[in-house]
Amino acid sequence: MRAEGTLTNDDPGTLTVRWGQPGLLYGEGHAEDGRFEVALADRPPAAAFDRGLALGEILLLPLGTVPRLGTPLARTTGAASGVALVFIDDASEHSEAWVHDFPAGFSCGSRTDDGGFAPTPCEDLEVHFQ
């Protein structure tokens, strides 16, 4: 499971993904030369799921940082604006309409005007770290 694409700002660094509450880290990658890539070896940790849905936020860390996966993160350099990694187990309990637009398993999403997400190909995301 991988997400990749272009950076609108060229901030090099280490990437990780923060999932759910309390914000467990799971996923690793890098940002450099106007491109980024982040990968997950398997599904997010069970604690990341809320009613069958896990939302992941791509975080930029200082270059060379080694994230402690499965633990909360104290400090970041930036967070990806307008995109999320989405993992659906069984979201039948969710009332938000956008959740049901995603297939089961791993996907990527772009923020919509109503505060939800719309499915977006994971191979060509455009990310800005704020």
Image (cartoon, grey):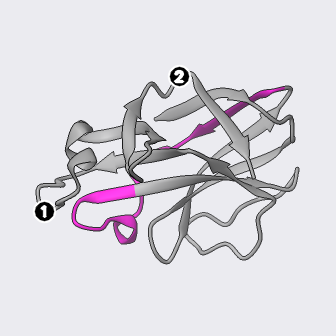
Q: Examine the rendered structure and indicate whether residue 120 appears above or below residue 79.
A: above
Q: Examine the rendered structure and indicate whether residue 80 appears above or below residue 101.
A: below
Q: Position of residue 1 (x, y in %)?
A: 46, 35
Mark 2 sits on what residue?
Answer: 123
Q: Position of residue 93 (x, y in %)?
A: 12, 62
Image label count:
2
Residue depicted at 35% across the width and 48% down the height: 87
Q: Residue furthest front?
A: 113
Disc 1 crowd, CA 10 A, few/some/many (<14, 14-19, 20+) = few
Q: Position of residue 64 (x, y in %)?
A: 87, 52
- Mark 2 or mark 1: which comes first in sequence? 1
124 with respect to 105 (left or right): right
Q: Examine the rendered structure and indicate whether residue 118 appears above or below residue 77.
A: above
Amino acid carrying label 2: it is: Glu
Amino acid carrying label 1: it is: Glu
Tell me, yes or no, if residue 42 can be seen here: no
Q: Magenta residues, as a range?
A: 34-54
Which disc number belongs to residue 49? none
Q: Residue furthest left?
A: 92
Mark 1 sits on what residue?
Answer: 93
Residue depicted at 71% across the width and 48% down the height: 15
